[in-house]
Image (cartoon, rainbow, N blue to C red):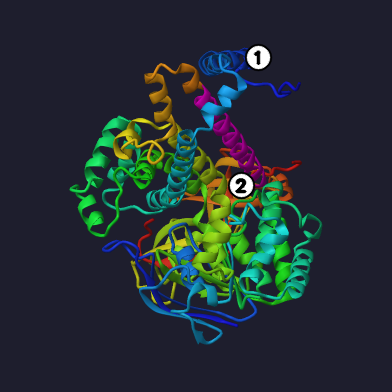
Amino acid sequence: MSRPARHRVLPGFRLSLGFSWFYLGLIVLIPLSSLFLRTFSLSWEEFWGTVTTPRALAAYRLSFGASLAAALANVVFGLLVAWVLVRYRFPGRDVLESLVDLPFALPTAVAGLTLTTLFSAKGWYGQYLDALGLKVAYTSVGVAIALTFIGLPFVVRTVQPVLEDIDVDVEEAAATLGASPWQTFRRVLLPALFPALLSGFTLAFARALGEYGSVVFISGNMPLRTEIVPLLIITRLEQFDYAGATAIAIVMLGASFSLLLAVNLLHRWSQRRLEARPGA
Amino acid sequence: MSIVVEQLARRFNRGGSPAVSRVSFHAPGGAITSLLGPSGAGKSTLLRLIAGLEIPDEGRVLIDGVDSTQMPVQQRGVGVVFQSYALFKHLTVRQNVAFGLEVRRVPKAEREARVEEMLRMVQLEHLGGRYPGQLSGGQRQRVAFARALAIRPRVLLLDEPFGALDTRVREELREWLHALHERTRLTTLLVTHDQQEALEISQHVVVLSEGRVAQAGSPADIYDRPASPFVASFIGGASVLRGHVQAGRAAMGALSVTAPAAAREGEPVHAFVRPHDIKLAKAVAGAASASTATGRVERLKPVGGYVKVFLRLPSGDEVTVEVPRSEFDALGVAEGDSVRADVRSATVFVGDYSI
């Protein structure tokens, strides 16, 4: 139990901490624990049976796989976009800056519909991809694309401020020491950006796991093939199988929470190296 | 390992004024050369052009007699130290110093030996395992020096290296750099806006103004024989007196000093007088010589070991005089008193003075 020894200008550590716990309890913890209560109506065998059906397993694979692919794609391209926005001044920069946030603002169903239209066999993109024998709409690739779309802002917005703080001097120093542009990127920039990239990745990944609206349109929702976990849960609910729905939700919740916790620990470890202070 | 710059020019904005316009100078091998000038004079741009971080529009850079104008920065073999330190925050002191050797693929044993040698040289061998965030400003800058010197550069380029440090550390590091240079004898280019720094540690000074060389020479040349009104006013905190040529002398009110040989009768002139080139004495009626005027003490400002006296001359010009504390006490003047000012030395230029 340590209380901040330093005097703070703004008082209220105990009050604000207490409220934080209360607030998170009220809007996160209690709703989620009711989820657990629901599943208690199932026996362990019933629970295990429900969460390991081939249909459920396929849905986990697709949800986690596509979310991972989307988050990784966003790390690469989000970094690129952030780089361009931070390092260059060009006409249309403000427009690009606002475009980045658009996936935040747009109702995800609109995004889903738009992407489906574009990628369907007769759509603007789809007609060319179709000619090459590539199918995007109603496949897992389509799911990943929708998830990439909605996750982009997370990486850009977490990397941008960190990149702004990195002095161009540091890159120039690396160059004068003989580092090639690739070595400078790999050995100087990337380690400095790693914590921010990890944060962006986590946010994009978490967002993608929970995404529903944009995916249902482009995926086609074929069980075993293009059905994501959130959709499977909805399907169960529509069949009035509340216990089944919550059982799958629990698995999803447990997996997401462990992943987020692991990434947060990794983040803390990488951040600590950058923020070493005297006496640390 | 001299650095020669020939007609170097760099313009950032089309149509704007050039940052560096046709600059030529020579930095002798084994010496410290200062690029001195106010901010915006183009000194940092010049350094970056020499380092290869900037590409010139015109002109040539010769390092050790070899045209290096088009040589990529990675191959120039220049050690650069930035005002911001520019250390790699995620690497320890030792890893920072080793960076240049690693990317140059220096074998491990040699690399480690050289890193230790460099850390000893900057007296940081006990802090090799720390991260830059755990060091003081002065220590960080010494790491930056060690990192730059580890690659055995042909020349050392310093861009306001002590600009972000407080006065005491700054003066310590200045001494330290001087001692380091005594040992390494590396050709060094020092960008600074601090004339004290330039005059103190360099053997050669290039004064820059608005992207051009205003004067180049030894510190003594620059200080004692300023070539232009700009240099005279920039160096040494001089006061300006205005007057005309009368009977072959530069007359400023009752005061007159020797006029430049080229000055014609009646032409306007202005003279720069350094704060310590005026001798004050008690005002006595009569006994005035040509270089003496009686002025009124407007304001007194004690600054540690000396007192700044702001004097109004009968001509209306104001001059600043620095009087050592003991001399001031013996003189015994107060604000409002009249004193006799004896101008012992002045630099006179023909023409009107305008800032």
In the image, the segment drawn in magenta is A247-273
In the foreground, B260 or B331 = B260
Task: Identify the residue position indicated by label 1 in the image.
Answer: A14
Instruction: Note whether residue B345 is visible.
Output: no
Query: Relative to residue B61, is residue A111 depicted above or below?
Result: above
For label 2, the SS is strand
State if disc 1 and disc 2 touch (CB < 8 Å): no
Q: Residue B65: where, in percent of width, then height?
A: 53, 87
Amino acid of disc 1:
Arg
Q: Classify 10 Å Cα crowding around label 1: few (below 14), some (14-19), many (20 and above).
A: few
* Left/right of residue B24 with respect to residue A22 in the rendered view: left
The residue that label 2 is drawn on is: B308
Q: Are marks 2 and 1 on the same chain?
A: no
Q: In the rendered structure, the residue with mark 2 lies on which chain?
A: B
Most extreme residue toward the right, as rendered? B126
Q: Residue furthest bottom?
A: B65
- The disc labelled 2 sits on which kind of residue? Lys
Inter-mark Cα distance, 2 to 1: 57 Å
Where residue B317 appears, x then y in whole percent? 45, 50
Q: Is residue B236 above or below residue A6?
A: below
Residue at (63% x, 77% y) in the render? B31
Quarter of the image with the C terminus of chain B is bottom left
Estimate the x, y position of residue A264 in percent, counting from the top left. Answer: 60, 37
